[in-house]
């Protein structure tokens, strides 16, 4: 069983990219992550935005933390989208509430992960608690788990998506590397020359030598996907 600990960044801005990101690994790898992460300065109360309030101290701390996930053998996973690329297609429709950036970025994150893992494996996704998006996320995950595609199933015909959970922030220590990665991606796409992008750059450099699972939807692709939905086609006729 794989476990994918994930977090988001950027959901509050409709005109900018939203990222869901995280890392994929087995229990033994995650146990090592917990140990090494705390040794490097992570642990209880860590959050990237709070660390960046003191840039001088943040630089060394984030540099130490950046190498932990890759050192422990985890695979980075990413889903990204810019809401302004498609919001005109869903505004005022039945899809509006469940087409928020958080939920839309969930699709490439989960689908590409399921395609990546081998046939003899299944995966559990663990997200930090999200009261606003959880009802819609549950719908998305359930739909993916029931989608009739053999590539998303294991050798026994079961969906590779074993389960998904949301954990309270105080218990989300293993989601902290995901918070760091998602914030780094958001910072780079919003302002690659800014201080936040510079300080979080180490984690992007660390994962740069490894294949990243997932996709950042282009404007053309997300509009093509949404345009194929029958209900949206009918609304525009």
Image: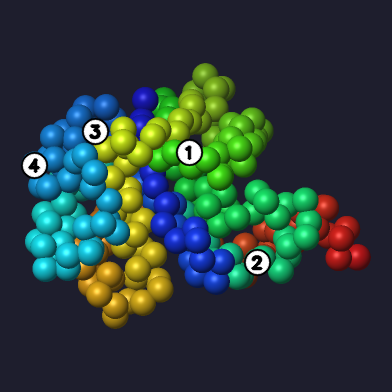
- Judging by the rendered image, the residue that carries numbered circle 2 is 86
Q: Is residue 151 left or right of residue 235?
A: left
Q: Are marks 3 and 2 in contact (CB under 8 Å)?
A: no
- Judging by the rendered image, the residue that carries numbered circle 3 is 30
Answer whether residue 76 is visible to the viewer in this image: no
Where is residue 9 drawn, in percent x and y?
Answer: 41, 57
Mark 2 residue element: loop
Mark 4 residue element: helix
Q: Are marks 4 and 2 in contact (CB under 8 Å)?
A: no
- Judging by the rendered image, the residue that carries numbered circle 1 is 114
Where is residue 237 drawn, in percent x and y?
Answer: 91, 65
Residue sitting nearer the eye, 34 or 211:
34
Rate crowding at label 2 as few (under 14), some (14 to 19) or many (20 or more) other CA atoms within 10 Å: many
Answer whether residue 170 is visible to the viewer in this image: yes
Of callouts 3 and 1, which one flags the residue occurring earlier in the amino acid sequence?
Answer: 3
Which residue is at 45% across, 34% downward? 166
């Amino acid at each position: 069983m794989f476990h994918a600990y994930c977090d988001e960044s950027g959901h509050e801005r409709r005109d900018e990219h939203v990222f869901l990101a995280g890392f994929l690994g087995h229990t033994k790898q995650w146990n090592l992550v917990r140990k090494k992460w705390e040794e490097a300065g992570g642990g209880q109360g860590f959050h990237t935005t709070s660390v960046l309030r003191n840039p001088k101290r943040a630089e060394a701390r984030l540099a130490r933390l950046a190498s932990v996930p890759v050192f422990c053998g985890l695979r980075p996973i990413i889903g990204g989208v810019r809401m302004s690329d498609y919001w005109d297609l869903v505004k005022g429709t039945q899809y509006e509430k469940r087409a928020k950036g958080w939920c839309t970025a969930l699709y490439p994150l989960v689908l590409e992960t399921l395609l990546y893992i081998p046939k003899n494996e299944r995966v559990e996704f663990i997200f930090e608690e999200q009261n606003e998006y959880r009802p819609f996320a549950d719908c998305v995950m359930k739909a993916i788990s029931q989608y009739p595609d053999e590539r998303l199933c294991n050798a026994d015909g079961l969906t590779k998506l074993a389960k998904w959970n949301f954990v309270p922030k105080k218990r989300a220590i293993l989601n902290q590397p995901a918070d760091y990665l998602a914030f780094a991606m958001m910072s780079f796409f919003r302002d690659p020359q800014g201080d936040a992008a510079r300080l979080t750059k180490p984690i992007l450099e660390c994962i740069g030598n490894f294949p990243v699972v997932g996709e950042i939807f282009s404007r053309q692709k997300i509009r093509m996907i949404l345009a194929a939905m029958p209900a949206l086609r009918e609304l525009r006729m």
